[in-house]
């Protein structure tokens, strides 16, 4: 059995007539961080959203090909999209905590999924906040609004909110683009810790960030996945001229 968690084959995605992803083939390893890089508009976020069918929410989207998660095609018509998104959770560019307390943000998912036991919820909230490296900073203000936290803390609340529903895969769409350098370092450290337990795919505009946090890197250009490999080789010995041009700053 291979340690590929996700296997993408012949993936095409159209926004109405516009083809945003072209014949993408890619394997994503378990317990690794995979970075998606490439110039603006090349399809990184679109690709990320195919991994938990978030594009389904956009009108006029058509997807062809297959995305296997642990060998099961997530695009099969009988797949329960709600439980898919529980297994494959997502963090966005701008932290988007709900306008409620830190506790209620993190308990939100488990409550939706039927957990009512107060002690159990307290345990889940603490474990998830510890998992998101935030517990020490918020344990005295669990019942205050999450909107009163700093941007970096809010992003970690969002990560704790994901961890609370016990996902397997974490999708992160430029999770530090709205954060200052210190908050960015904390999230990057957290990503390195989380990969022990989760498979992580991160979109980033920042090549230093990709080099710092990821094990594998995939370079996208005009909807094509040009090259994917060990981060160190992609950055130091790219196989494709277009990857080299991008990495050396010749475009994008
Ligand atoms: N909802 C949509 N409807 C129509 N076209 C879209 C939609 N979302 C994205 N696109 C187009 O698909 C292409 C890929 O966009 P996508 O956001 O995936 O790129 P990206 O590489 O993540 O860009 P960025 O780095 O700027 O976020 C772009 O040409 C974009 O304009």
Image (cartoon, grey):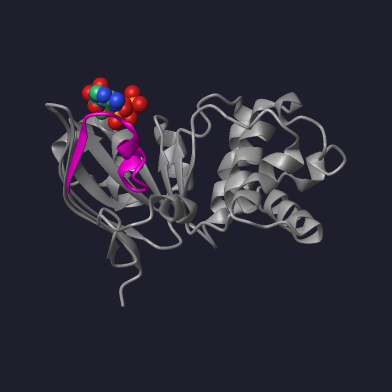
> 73 left or right of 146?
left
Whether the magenta-drawn stretch holds residue 125 is answered as no
> 115 left or right of 199?
right
Ligand 1 falls in quadrant: top left
Coordinates of residue 137 in the picture (x, y in percent): 80, 40
Whether the magenta-drawn stretch holds residue 57 is answered as yes
**Is residue 89 at least partly visible in the picture?**
yes
> Which of the pair 244/83 is nearer the observer?
83
> 1 left or right of 85?
left
State which quadrant residue 161 falls in: top right
State which quadrant residue 203 falls in: top left
In the orientation shown, which residue stands out farthest toward the right?
140
In the rendered structure, which segment of residues is drawn in magenta?
Answer: 49-64
Coordinates of residue 134 in the picture (x, y in percent): 72, 44
State which quadrant residue 144 falls in: top right
Coordinates of residue 37 in the picture (x, y in percent): 33, 36
**Is residue 251 at least partly visible in the picture?**
no
Task: Indicate the quadrant containing the C terminus: top left, top right, bottom left or bottom right.
Answer: top left
> Which of the pair 243/111 is nearer the observer?
111
Residue at screen point 35% across, 70% down: 3
Residue at screen point 42% across, 31% down: 206
């Amino acid at each position: 059995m291979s340690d590929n968690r996700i296997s993408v084959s012949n993936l095409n995605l159209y926004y109405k007539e516009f083809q945003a992803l072209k014949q993408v083939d890619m394997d994503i390893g378990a317990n690794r961080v995979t970075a998606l890089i490439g110039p603006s508009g090349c399809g990184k976020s679109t690709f990320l959203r195919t991994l938990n069918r978030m594009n389904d929410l956009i009108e006029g989207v058509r997807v062809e090909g297959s995305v296997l998660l642990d060998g099961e095609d997530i695009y099969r018509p009988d797949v329960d999209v709600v439980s898919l998104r529980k297994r494959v959770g997502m963090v966005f560019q701008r932290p988007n905590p709900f306008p409620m307390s830190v506790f209620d943000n993190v308990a939100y998912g488990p409550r939706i999924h039927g957990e009512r036991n107060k002690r159990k919820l307290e345990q889940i909230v603490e474990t998830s906040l510890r998992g998101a490296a935030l517990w020490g900073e918020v344990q005295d203000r669990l019942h205050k609004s999450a909107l009163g936290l700093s941007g970096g803390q809010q992003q970690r609340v969002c990560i704790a909110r994901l961890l609370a529903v016990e996902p397997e895969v974490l999708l992160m769409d430029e999770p530090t683009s709205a954060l200052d350098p210190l908050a960015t370092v904390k999230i990057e450290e957290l990503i390195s810790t989380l990969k022990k337990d989760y498979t992580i795919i991160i979109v980033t505009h920042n090549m230093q960030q990709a080099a710092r946090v990821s094990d594998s890197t995939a370079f996208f250009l005009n909807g094509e996945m040009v090259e994917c490999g060990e981060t160190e080789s992609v950055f130091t010995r790219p196989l494709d001229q277009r990857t080299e041009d991008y990495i050396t700053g010749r475009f994008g």
